[in-house]
Image (tube, rainbow, N blue to C red):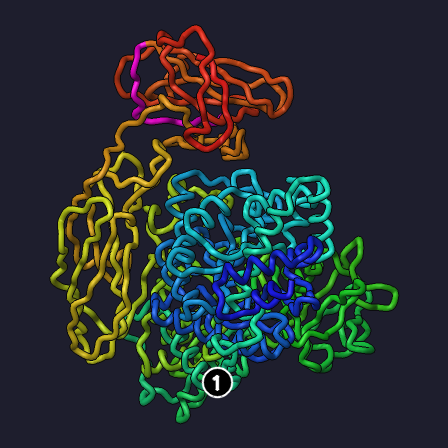
Amino acid sequence: MKEKNILFKNIHELLEVRVTPLLGLLTQDEKISLLSTSQSAIPRLGIKEYQVGGEAAHGVVDRKGGKTTVFPQPIGLSCTWNRELMKKVGSVIGDEARIFYEQNQQKTGLTLWAPTIDMERDPRWGRTEEAYGEDPYLTGQLATELIKGMQGEDPFYIKLVAAPKHFYGNNNEYGRERISNSIDPRNRYEYYLKAFEPAFKEGKALSMMTAYNGVNGIPAMQIREIKEIVKDQWKMDGFVVCDGGALTLNVEEYGYYSSYAEALADALKKGIDCFVDEKERVEEAAREALKQQLITEEELTKAIGNMLKVRFRLGHFDEDTSKNPYSEVDKNKLCSREHAELALESTNESIVLLKNEQNKLPLKKEKLKKIAVIGPTADIVYRDWYTGYSPYQITPLMGIKHQSANQQIQFVKGNDKIVLKSLDTNGYMTLGEDDELVFAADAIGEKEIFELEEWGWNGNLLKNQANQRYICQNEQDARFKASSQEVFNWFIREKMGFHTVNEKQETYHLSTWQGEPLNIDDGQRLTTASQPGTFQKQILSSGIEEAVQAAKESDVAIVCLGNNPMLNGRETEDRPDIILPKRQQKLLEEVYKVNKNVVLVLISSYPMAINWAEQHIPAILYSSHGSQMLGESIASILFGDIVPSGKLSMTWYKSVRQLPTIFDYDIIRSKRTYQYFDEEVLYPFGYGLSYAICQYDRLQLDKTTLTKDETVSINVEVENLTNELAYEVVQLYATVKGSAVPRPRKQLVDFIKIKLQPYEKRKVSLSVTADQLMIWNVNEDRYTLETASCLLSVGPSSEDIKLTESLQIQGQDLHQRSLREVTKAENYNDYDGVYLDKGENGLNCVTNRANGWIAFENVEMFAEKLCVELRVTTDGIPGKVKLKIDQLNHSSIIEKEFTVQYPGEWVDVQLPFTANQDLHDLFILMEGPVAINTLQLKEIDGPDREKWKRTSLRKKYGLGVLDMIV
C-alpha cells in the first residue's frame, strides 16, 4: 500500500503508471465523492478538495469580484479572424487562471468551461455573444487556437483545461431544458459537429461540456456521439461534464428518466465523467445505480480515471513541482499592462467598419470644434453573464474625450427623465424608508425623478436620480427598492414592463420582470397584485430633444446604440426580433434630421437589422461588448490612429422574416447561413471595410485536379494601394458544382490575416484539402469525396470575390443509390413534415409531424417485382404508410394501414410494387403518429421469397439483430 501511495505521487513515472495505483487505492465511496464537480478531499491520500468549473469565455470570471483582464465577447473575438491573436488571448487566460487558482488556495480555477463553439445558425439565439459565428471552419480554427493558448505548450503539464461547449445542436434558449432538436446526418456531420472536431483533434482539448437540449429525442448528456465520436473517433483524452443541473433537469423537466439513478447510469455509459449538479444528489444517484446494478464499479472507475488523469496533468498530486512550468506563474501578470495591451489589440481587430460613405471616417480633428456623443451605450462598458471584473473600463465617451482634447464634447445619453403617478391615489412614486418605492409624494423633487432606459420589447429600467440606483423587486417579497447599482444577475428583477392604457394620456399598467401585474398596497408601496393599477408617466425632460439640440450645435454626432446584454437576448432568453429597439431607432432618426454628419457606433451582442441606418447614416462601426479597452479602440478607429480590420462572423439579415423558426436546425433545407441563404442580406459573412484598399492578383493553384487525401496549395498576390497601413483578411471559398445533392453556395476553406505596409505587395499562401470538400454520404454512412467541379474563390468577404480558379475533384459518383441493405430511415435525401426521434436499437427514427414524407432519390430498381420493407411503430393508434414513385404528386402505388399491440412496439410492414429496372425516386408518406426506423428494398421473386430472412444490423451498425420479412 505504501509503495502505491508513493508511486502515484512520483512525477518521474508515466501518467498511466501514476493513475492506475491511485484508482486502486480509492474505495468505492471515495470514487463516488469524485463524481460531481464538488470533488471531496481524501486526507489519507493527501488529495485536496477541488471544485471543477468556472467561466473564461473572454477572460477569467471571479464571481467574488476579483479583477482579471477582460477581452471582447467571443462574438467580437471571432470578428478578428486572427488565429495567432486567439492563441495569445488563450495564453493570457491560462496565466490568469493559474493565478486565480493560487488565490483560491488551489481549490478551483483550472478546469474552466470555455470556449463556446455552438454553431450560430440563428442570430436570435440569446447566447450569440458567447460563440464564434455561423461557420464551422472559422469557429473551429479560432477556438482551436484559443484552446492551445489556454492549455499551454508543455508536452505533459496543462496550464488550464479547456472545455468546449455545448455539445451539440445548442442554438435556442426557449425550452432548451426539455425539448429535442432534430438534426439529420448531413447537418450533423457537415455542420454541427465540424466546429467541435478540430478542438479535440488539433487543439487536444481535455474536457467538454454537453448541452441541455436533446438531439433527436435524447438529452445531450446521453447521446451516443459523446463516446463514439468525441472519445473514440476524435481521441479526446480527458473528461466530459454535463451542463449545470442537467441530471436534475433530465428527470424533472425533460422527463427522459423517472429517477436520478437511471439518468446518471445512462449518462455515465454514454461518456459523461463528471456531473455538474448538487453533490449529494449525484452521489446518492451513483450509489443507487450501483445498488440496482445499472452501472458497475468498473464503469465508475473509468469515469473517475478520466478525470484524475487530467488532474495529474494539472499537477494536483505533485509533491515535487519542479517539472511543472505552470506551478508558479508570476502573480504580477494578473491585470498587467502586457495583458491590457493584448486586450487592446484584440479589441482593435474585432471592430468592423460596416459603412464609410465618401470616406467619412476617419474623422479629421482639425475640422471639428464641437462633437456630440449620444446614446445609451456611449458611457458604459456592459458586462454579459460570462464577463469578469476588469480593473477598469474605458467607455467610448472616455476614449473620444481622450482623443479630442481640443474639441468641445457634449454628451447626451438620450433617456427621458420621468415621474410616475398613481391615478388611484394621485401620489408620485418616491423613495421611502430604506429606499423602498412608495406612491406617497405630492410634489416632485429629486427622489421622485427616474431615468427611464427603454431597451425594447418592454425591457425597461428605472434609475432613481437621488441615489443613482435602479429599482429592483426584492428577492424575499413582492415589493421594490431603488437598490441596484448595476443591472447584473441571473434573474433581472430590475426589468419593468409598461403596458399602454391610453397613449395620449401616457397612462400604463406596469408589470414585473416575470410579467406579474403591479399595483400599490394599503401602505402605498409598489407591489405585485392580482389586478394592475393605472399609472401615469410624466416626462420632465426628453432625452431625444436633448440629443437633437446637442446634434444641432455640433460638427459631428457620434451616436452609440446597441443592446444591454442583460435584457432581450441572453442565456434563457432568445430575441423576439433582430431590429434596433424602437426608442433607439427614433433617437437615431431625429438626430439625423438636424445633422447629416452622423457616425453610428453599434455596440451589440449580436447582428442587428439596421436597414434605415445603412440607407442614411454615412458611417457605421460595429463592436461587441465587454472589453475593458472598448472605448480606446473605438476612438482610435474613429480618428484614424488605427485602421479597422474586423470581419463579420455571421450573416446580418435584413429582417426576421428571412429566418425560419428558431427550432429548425436544418441549414440545408431551410437555407440558413451564408452557405445556403440565397436572398439579399444587409451585410454578408466575412464582410468588413477598411481605410485601405487592397488589390488581388495572380491566383495560382499547384494542381487542377484533387483526389482523396490530397491538398491543393493556392497562392495569390495582395497589394495595398494606399498610404494607409492595411490589415487584410484574405478569404478562400469553395463552391462545388454538379453535385448529386444540395451543396453550399460557398464554403470557407481557408483564411489568413496579413499586415501590409503602405503600397506593399505580398504573395499569400492558402490551401484546401480533399477532406474539407467531402460530404456525408447518406448512401453509405460515411464521408465521401464526390466527383464534381469546384470553383475556388478568393476575396475580402464571401460576397466580394476578386479572383476565381476552377478545380476538378476526382472521387465517387453519388448520382444513384442502393437500398438493398437495411438503411436507416434518417438517411433520406429529402423530407417534409417529419422530425427525428429516438428509435429502435439506438438508431434515430423518422417521426411524422403532419402528413410527412421522406424521399430516397435515384434508387436502383434491381428487379421488376420489389418490396419496400419498413420497420415502423406508432404511439398506440393505427398508422398508415404509402409509397409513391418518381413524383410526390403522383398517386400512391400502394398504401398500408398497420397497428401495434402497445405504444412503441416496432413491427415490419411490406409495400410490394412493380417498377422498371432503372433509377427511380421513392417517396414514403405517413399518416397518423407513425415513426420509421429502417427500410430495405427487396426482390419479391428472389430465392428467399417464402421464408423469414434474418438481416444483421450488428454487422453494419454494431447493433442488435432485427428480423425482417421478405
Q: Quadrant of the C terminus?
A: top left
Residue picked out by circle 1: 336
Looking at the image, which residue is at 49% across and 39% down? 182
Looking at the image, which residue is at 34% across and 57% down? 685
* Residue at the right extreme, as displayed: 522
The reply, left or right, for residue 407 in relation to residue 58 is left
- Measured as percent of width and height from the top left, residue 567 is found at 58, 63
Q: Residues within 10 Å of mark 1 (few under 14, many from 20)?
A: some
Looking at the image, which residue is at 46% across and 71% down? 72
Q: Quadrant of the N terminus?
A: bottom right
The reply, left or right, for residue 479 in relation to residue 21 is right
Can I make out residue 548 in this image?
A: no
Residue 899 picture quarter: top right
Question: Is residue 964 placed above or below 557 in the rendered structure?
Answer: above
In this view, the residue in front, 588 or 715, is 715
Can I make out residue 21 in this image?
A: yes
Q: Amino acid at mark 1?
A: Ser
Residue 717 lies within the magenta run: no
In this view, the residue in front, 544 or 653, is 653
Magenta segment boundaries in residue numbering: 851-864
Question: Is residue 179 placed above or below 624 in the rendered structure?
Answer: above
- Measured as percent of width and height from the top left, residue 488 is found at 63, 69
